[in-house]
């Protein structure tokens, strides 16, 4: 963390994020920024958002690091961990130390988290109109709990995530479900585009996402629109890939 008081950092983050909501924005891109802000403001190593589909199945929507992404996916595969519990109960979860007690609670998850370098885990619910939409997971590399102020910050960011997904519509079951489907569909096409760029550029998935996101920002495009064009428009794809390759490495001509 910097020497700037956290209250100022939180207000700056909320102001910036709400500012983004008042203009044309991309859901996946803004939720990615939200995870980055969450990790920074709460002084944890990584963060990730899990979003539920209409059938109560959680899906990864955004994560700050490969380790967080892998651990979030592992939670889903094993159906255990802080985000799973948080989604099921609708209540925050905070484990300050991944010790034997935590392992008894999550026997598959804890060894995987420790192996990934994490020592503490937390989650807060994303909730609208009495519906739990998902969870914000927070992962620390050192032991430590979340105090009341931390939980308030995390819950505020989770609320902003809900507003981002709902995009200003009144949160009722009839309006929530289509927005959930749209957000998950956007994430799916972004994942596909990341995989394509990973192969083309011969880089890691994380580097491919950084390039894709950077190119979309530089060209004033929505991240999901760019990913959809890359995956669905086979006529413009070669030119687009050439431009993205140039963007990733300006020395390539």
Image (cartoon, rainbow, N blue to C red):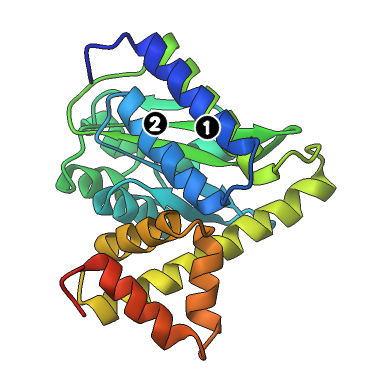
Residue 188 higher or lower than 139, as above or below: below
Judging by the rendered image, the residue that carries numbered circle 2 is: 38
Residue 8 image position (x, y, % from top left): 40, 12
Q: Which mark is residue 195?
A: none
- Based on the displayed image, in which of its 4 quarters is residue 246 positioned? bottom left
- Based on the displayed image, in which of its 4 quarters is residue 215 positioned? bottom left
**Disc 2 secondary structure class:** helix
Q: Nearer the viewer, residue 136 or 240?
A: 240
- Left or right: 190, with 52 as reference point: left
Q: Residue at x 35, y 75 (%)?
A: 243
Disc 1 to disc 2, how far (Cα)?
12 Å
Q: Are marks 1 and 2 in contact (CB under 8 Å)?
A: no
Label 2, residues with CA under 10 Å away: few <14, some 14-19, many ≥20: many
Q: Nearer the viewer, residue 104 or 139?
A: 139
Q: Residue at x 74, y 38 (%)?
A: 168
Residue 50 image position (x, y, % from top left): 49, 48
Judging by the rendered image, the residue that carries numbered circle 1 is: 17
- Left or right: 11, with 107 as reference point: right
Q: Residue at x 27, y 80 (%)?
A: 199
Q: Earlier in the sequence, mark 1 or mark 2?
A: 1
């Amino acid at each position: 963390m910097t020497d700037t008081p956290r209250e100022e950092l939180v207000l700056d983050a909320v102001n910036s994020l709400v500012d983004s909501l008042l203009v044309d924005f991309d859901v996946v891109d803004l939720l990615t920024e939200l995870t980055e802000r969450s990790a920074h403001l709460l002084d944890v190593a990584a963060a990730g958002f899990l979003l539920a589909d209409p059938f109560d199945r959680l899906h990864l929507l955004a994560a700050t690091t490969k380790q967080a992404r892998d651990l979030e996916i592992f939670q889903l595969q094993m159906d255990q961990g802080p985000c799973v519990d948080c989604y099921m109960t609708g209540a925050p979860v905070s484990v300050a130390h991944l010790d034997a007690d935590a392992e008894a609670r999550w026997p598959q998850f804890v060894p995987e988290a420790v192996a990934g370098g994490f020592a503490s885990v937390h989650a807060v619910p994303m909730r609208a109109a009495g519906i739990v939409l998902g969870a914000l997971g927070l992962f620390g590399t050192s032991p430590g709990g979340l105090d009341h102020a931390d939980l308030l910050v995390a819950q505020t960011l989770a609320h902003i995530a809900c507003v981002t997904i709902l995009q200003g519509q009144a949160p009722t079951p009839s309006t929530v479900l289509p927005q959930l489907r749209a957000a998950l569909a956007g994430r799916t096409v972004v994942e596909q585009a990341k995989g394509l760029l990973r192969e083309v550029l011969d880089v890691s998935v994380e580097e491919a996402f950084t390039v894709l996101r950077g190119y979309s920002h530089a060209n004033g495009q929505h991240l999901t629109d760019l990913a959809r064009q890359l995956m669905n428009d086979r006529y413009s794809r070669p030119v687009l890939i050439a431009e993205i390759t140039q963007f990733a490495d300006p020395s390539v001509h």
